[in-house]
Image (cartoon, rainbow, N blue to C red):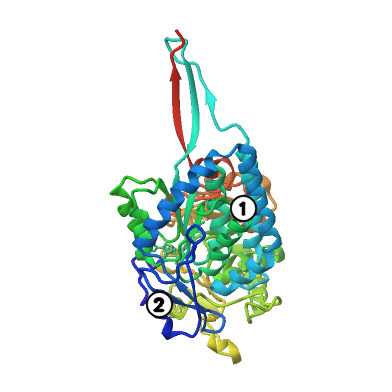
């Protein structure tokens, strides 16, 4: 989504707000090679901040600063590095409310959904625990008495690129393990959602991390491209859409820079005929159109329902959706908020209109923009459900990234698995059943990096989380997530 997108830089004179600078070391450059971006709060459509954008010049400067900081960081004892990460987690914990609010201001996610800030706290503590644990091993070697040992080392300076819906999640799942492994980070949030990431960078300094260890570079695609192409970057960790991933993989090929990709999904949520329908309906509504207005990689946008319970499920599901409280994302009682931008709103309404025109399914609820009262100023799309959707349709095959879900009927387990696997994606899958043998059997057959049984997605620091097929190539969380930021060295010492 948005690959190659560029924004029209604005000048300070265009908006009456002081621009927020990047964070490079301890410097806050607000006059940069890539200009400024007027940030818009999706809840009101109004500009609430102006941010500086990083370009090639700022990427280059950040790499130099980060190289020095990484040397200092990796020169500390493991106790010191572990304790610094725990200090950072403590500082983050004190600022959870503030981070949650900035996260809401970033992209309009309801503040009641404060999970992203909490994740940051959890992941930092988890990965701090790895710093002083064994990272290497030794092994005998054939035909000699040599000492052969294997060490895991940091890449040096790594680039972490985040989507607009996940700068705190990416700080948690990628920056925390990168630091634990001994790297310095150039962290590039989307220009659409830079506020929480910038505050996180400030908190890193407040916690006593070496200046330059974590640099925050809000940027458009152009700044991101400069980051990917910089020869001083040891590895790129990218979270975002598949089209952007293709650009990045091509750009990274010039320097043969390794890239991890965490991409989108078209996750199936399978409701078997023995499921507890009330619970399944509530979970499916939250995991589908309601959670972040469907703007989550974990959105279960295809709900596969057994024919025998289809009508009973649909009735319950629509009742939950109609009870969702739509409103100002900063109001703690709001459960359903806006989409990220006017452009996203137009695109999502286009997807719905196209699906209706092509008779991909029957529109059961929603389908339009919410224009009641103050909501008309923001970018609110009604939670939208289409029934009896054809899984071969564009609606069922492509990530919509909005509050739109498809209901699809199936008649037996075999058919459910076949439909669930029949997309290019493989990020999450959900199963609702009381039969644990069925749950195990179906889970094994699903082509998906995560399978959640009788629950929604609950991404934990212990992980691993990531995609099959076109949903990505690496993992975040746990040892697998740490390993993404370590390279392996074999050292062999002759003993004779
Ligand atoms: P996007 O692909 O448009 O942008 C992601 C990031 O890449 C942004 O920071 C953007 O500025 C940057 N970028 C764009 N073009 C670039 C280029 N040529 N070189 C370098 N950087 C570039 O995605 P988005 O619209 O910000 O986010 C939505 C997507 O992210 C969805 O597909 C969603 O599923 C995915 N996502 C995945 C996960 C996961 O963990 N798998 C988590 C959250 C979001």
Q: Which residue is mark 2?
A: 354
Residue appearing at x 48%, y 42% in the figure? 71
Ligand 1 lies in quarter: bottom left
- Give residue 59's position: percent from left, percent from top: 39, 58
First in sequence: mark 2 vs mark 1: 1
- Give residue 290's position: percent from left, percent from top: 60, 71
Quarter occupied by the N terminus: bottom left
| 93 is higher (above) or lower (below) than 108 | above
Compared across the picture, whether 486 is left or right of 358 comes to right
- In the image, 27 versus 378, the foreground residue is 27
Residue appearing at x 45%, y 62% in the figure? 217
- Give residue 278's position: percent from left, percent from top: 71, 66
Number of marks drawn: 2
Separation of residues labelled 2 and 1 (CA atoms):
53 Å
| 395 is higher (above) or lower (below) than 38 | above
- Give residue 133's position: percent from left, percent from top: 62, 34
Crowding at dot 1, Cα within 10 Å, few <14 / some 14-19 / many 20+, comes out as: few
Badge number at residue 208? 1
Compared across the picture, whether 245 is left or right of 46 comes to left
SS type, badge 2: helix
């Amino acid at each position: 989504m948005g690959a190659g997108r560029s924004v029209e830089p604005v000048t300070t004179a265009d908006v009456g707000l002081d621009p927020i600078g990047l964070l490079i070391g301890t410097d806050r450059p607000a006059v940069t090679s890539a200009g400024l971006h007027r940030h818009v709060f999706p809840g009101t459509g109004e500009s609430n901040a102006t941010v500086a954008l990083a370009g090639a010049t700022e990427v280059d400067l950040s790499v130099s600063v980060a190289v020095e900081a990484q040397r200092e960081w990796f020169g500390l004892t493991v106790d010191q590095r572990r304790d610094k990460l725990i200090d950072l987690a403590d500082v983050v914990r004190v600022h959870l409310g503030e981070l949650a609010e900035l996260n809401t201001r970033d992209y309009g996610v309801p503040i009641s959904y404060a999970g992203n800030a909490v994740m940051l706290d959890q992941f930092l503590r988890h990965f701090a625990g790895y710093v002083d644990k064994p990272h290497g091993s030794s092994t005998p070697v054939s035909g000699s008495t040599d000492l052969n040992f294997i060490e895991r080392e940091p890449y040096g300076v790594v680039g972490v690129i985040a989507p607009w819906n996940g700068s705190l999640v990416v700080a948690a799942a990628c920056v925390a393990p990168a630091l634990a492994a001994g790297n310095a980070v150039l962290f590039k949030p989307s220009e659409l959602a830079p506020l929480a990431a910038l505050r996180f960078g400030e908190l890193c300094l407040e916690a006593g991390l070496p200046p330059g260890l974590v640099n925050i570079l809000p940027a458009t695609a152009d700044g991101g491209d400069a980051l990917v192409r910089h020869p001083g970057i040891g590895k790129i960790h990218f979270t975002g859409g598949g089209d952007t991933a293709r650009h990045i993989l091509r750009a990274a090929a010039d320097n043969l820079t390794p890239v991890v990709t965490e991409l989108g999904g078209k996750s199936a949520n399978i409701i078997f005929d023995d499921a507890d329908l009330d619970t399944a309906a509530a979970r499916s509504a939250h995991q589908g159109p309601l959670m972040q207005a469907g703007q989550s990689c974990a959105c279960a946008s295809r709900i596969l329902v057994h024919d025998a319970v289809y009508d009973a499920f649909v009735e319950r599901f629509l009742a939950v959706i109609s009870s969702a409280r739509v409103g100002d994302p900063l109001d703690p009682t709001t459960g359903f908020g806006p989409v990220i931008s006017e452009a996203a709103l137009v695109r999502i309404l286009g997807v719905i209109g196209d699906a209706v025109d092509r008779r991909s399914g029957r529109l059961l609820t929603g389908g339009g923009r919410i224009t009641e009262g103050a909501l008309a100023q923001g970018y609110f799309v009604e939670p939208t459900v289409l029934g009896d959707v054809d899984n071969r349709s564009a609606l069922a095959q492509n990530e919509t990234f909005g509050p739109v879900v498809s209901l699809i009927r199936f008649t037996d387990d075999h058919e459910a698995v076949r439909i669930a696997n029949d997309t290019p994606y493989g990020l999450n899958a959900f199963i609702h059943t009381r039969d644990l043998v069925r749950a195990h059997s179906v889970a094994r057959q699903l082509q998906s990096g995560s399978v959640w049984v009788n629950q929604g997605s609950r991404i934990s620091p212990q992980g691993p989380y990531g995609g099959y097929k076109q949903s990505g190539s690496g993992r975040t969380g746990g040892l697998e997530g740490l390993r993404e930021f370590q390279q392996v060295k074999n050292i062999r010492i002759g003993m004779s």
